[in-house]
Image (cartoon, grey):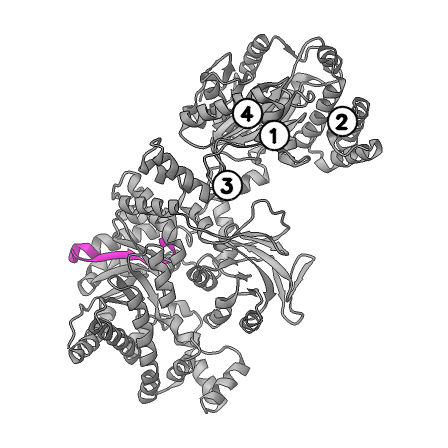
Amino acid sequence: MATKFVYYFGSGKAEGAATMKNLLGGKGANLAEMCNLGCPVPAGFTISTEACVYYFTHKGKYPQGLEAEISKNMKRLEKEMGRDFGSPVNPLLLSVRSGARASMPGMMDTVLNLGLNDVTIPALIAKTGNARFVYDSYRRFISMFGDVVLNVKKDVFNAILEKMKEAEGALFDADLSAEALKELVDQFKSAVKKQTGKSFPQDSQTQLKMAVDAVFDSWDNQRARDYRKMYNIPETWGTAVNVQSMVFGNMGNDSGTGVAFSRNPSTGENKFFGEFLVNAQGEDVVAGIRTPLNVTGMAKVFPQATADLLKIAKKLELHYNDMMDLEFTIQDKKLYMLQARVGKRTAAAAVKVAVDLVSEKRISRKDALKRIEPAQLDQLLHPTIDHKAKVTVMAHGLPASPGAAVGQVVFSSLEARQLAEKGGSPILVRYETSPEDLSGMSVSKGILTVHGGMTSHAAVVARGMGKCCISGVGEIKIDEPHRLFAVGKTAVHAGDWITLDGSTGRVILGKTNLVSPSLSNDFFTLMKWADETRSLGIRANADTPADAALARKFGAEGIGLCRTEHMFFAKDRILAVREMIIADNKPARARALRKLLPMQRNDFKGILRAMEGLPVTIRLLDPPLHEFLPKTEEQLETLAHEMRLLPKEVEKRAKQLSESNPMLGHRGCRLGITFPEIYDMQVRAIYEAAVELKKRGVNVLPEVMIPLVGTIQELTICRNHAITTANEVLKKGKTKIPVVIGTMIELPRAALIADKIATAADFFSFGTNDLTQTCLGLSRDDAGTFLPEYVKKGIFKEDPFVSIDEEGVGQLMQIGIHKGRSTNKKLKIGICGEHGGDPLSVNLCHRLGLDYVSCSPYRLPIARLAAAHAALSGGKKSGVSGTA
């Protein structure tokens, strides 16, 4: 255990430094660094994160020696400041602030003006000659301490304050007189006594102990837990506590407080950006009680302090080589720095700042790449909610597809199409979606489902379309007869407006302002650097020519997954597909397939043309046939009428095809073996399209992928059929095109016997969605109801349908790669599950030595940058962590 828990800073030097943020937290480390750089920082000390960790692991007890260290450093602080904490003659006042190693703005607690009490008040008034300032500070302290430490809600104090302002005719807090503030102090203390049953604590040492405890405790408050979960910050880190001598921005019109950035945090423009308030303390700027002035206005009021601030901002940016976020206070026209940290910024600003710093020769291209979190790029590719917007969140779900959408609630695909045809903006709300909802999903602004997980049908399709989607919102109850959904007592009717935040999973009542995406030249510059750095290939999952064109725009090097089943739901062919399914003999099925052949051929022509010169991996039919049939009795009767059959015949066939567990049923290569004519038609369509394009001078590179293989015999049978059909087409067309046939590895057995399967495969593509299901025994559509709890309890570090389960699925992949390449040295290997756009999974794929990852078009920039990060992390193909 550590023997030192407290680190002092002041007098132009400090015991800490910026490199010690794991121990001192970001705030404490940067306060120490500013001291060491000669910046005007009020003296103080930092209680380390190790003390916080001990506090939590020992049920609120301090480690031995901590209280003595606090006392020793307090004496040092008193000596430097020339004032005594709790003195009735010359009192020292303190701020007590949190500070974790990762920036968590506003998530934990702060107490200002600590040390004020009925004894120190007269001394402070005598010393400053400013009773208004003293009582203003005291009422702030009581309300802040009451809220943070004593759990008296802010609303209690705010109601008293508003009533006082009304009585005094004051528009702002700053308009209240000293007498009114003195009365407010008495009323606040009475409120504390009423709410807690105890008087407001008057002993300064007691106040300090309680404040330090409260800041430690705030590490575990709900908003801090939520923030850590959102940004993957470990709960074991703990927070430091910074105890610092107070400087006062509320001493009158010669004082003020503010926040500034060395560059614009919204745009990244190299222009100083800041806001401040005269006669205020820090929480006033954050709370928005008054409209702050910009830096231009500040220069008119405090010219010297502003000039000093600009010099310090430049000095700190040069020192840290990054955009800086600064907090400052001006007391009697003198500037004091309270915080410096690398500034939070939008994705657009992050890209611009990184590229600009390279242009300024301040950082390298590699450093620039490292500074952009791949997931941040989502902000640039989709609409986002305006960060200034005030919203009413009614429910939370899984952030299944990023972006934001504003629209009117509809409950069926038909309603979505009808509303869209009228120029409306539908948001499709369903218990869950199915392939039949594709037409409604395609015209909807966003999709909201009660059930399903991150790789449910709704999630996968929405990501491919670039549509916002929130799934697994279990709080929602849909009342279809009354055409509404409810969360608790709040009802939302068909036609009502809602907003979806697909990046966080928030369901928001009403309309919200959105920010449209834009791609700057800096973005393309950054992507070029990423491509030059990465070794992992990046392909796209694309099912249409439009998807393929978009994929090329976002830098795809081919298509890693083209799902033919999505084509089958188009209006011009769904009836022919259903004829093929209903057919109970081979001739009837062949007639239907002849109708489908030209349609499929045109599909493949469009995609192959769009991806000219790049490989296109086309997966043969995968889902069970019954998925293409209507579900209700009324729909089945309509189908029977369209096919000129008796309803009983259609219902009988539908019943024959239905399965208890279709995910493990008659699907994938099992269809190709029992109904080889289906796969034959698709292979024929692929190569007829390829031959036609090749004759027109288009360079085509089709690859045929056979799904759900679990035995070498399955692959051999399907492969032989495919080769025979492809060669017939090529011979007839007098054209040479390589016949490339591979398989998906999505069953544990396939990974375990990959050495055998590889002898009949030109490539492997890990279908990590199904491999996760079959490895973990989880249904991706149903697990969303409990997986969040598993992640919360640490059973899974991440949702395994979001990031590959390295310990289980990752080991199966490693086995499959090793065994596959042991018998086929030329075997090309990639993944085509939705994990291909997840940065953690991309990193694993790099370490495993895959050739490429494939993901939805809108996630391609994320995958490209993540692959560059993986290469920069050491570039070692080390395999799965903790395994041989």
Amino acid beneath label 3? Ser
Mark toward the start of the polypeptide (3 vs 1) = 3
Q: Nearer the viewer, mark 1 or mark 2?
A: 1
Name which residue type carries label 1.
Answer: Gly
Q: Which mark is residue 842?
A: none
Tell me where the magenta segment starts and ends, as one range: 820-836
Name the residue tied to disc 2: 198
Of tags 4 and 1, which is closer to the observer? 1
Rounded to the nearest whole Å, what is the CA distance between mark 4 and mark 1? 34 Å
> Of the residues under marks 2 and 4, which one precedes in the sequence?
2
Up-down: is 499 above or below 643? above
According to the picture, the residue beneath numbered tag 3 turns out to be: 266
The picture places residue 812, in percent across and down from the top left corner, at 30, 53
2 and 3 marks in contact (CB < 8 Å): no
Q: Secondary structure at mark 4?
A: strand
The answer for how far apart the CA atoms under marks 2 and 3 are is 46 Å
Q: Measure the alpha-carbon separation of dots 1 and 2.
A: 45 Å
Q: Which mark is residue 241?
A: 4
Q: Is residue 214 visible?
A: no
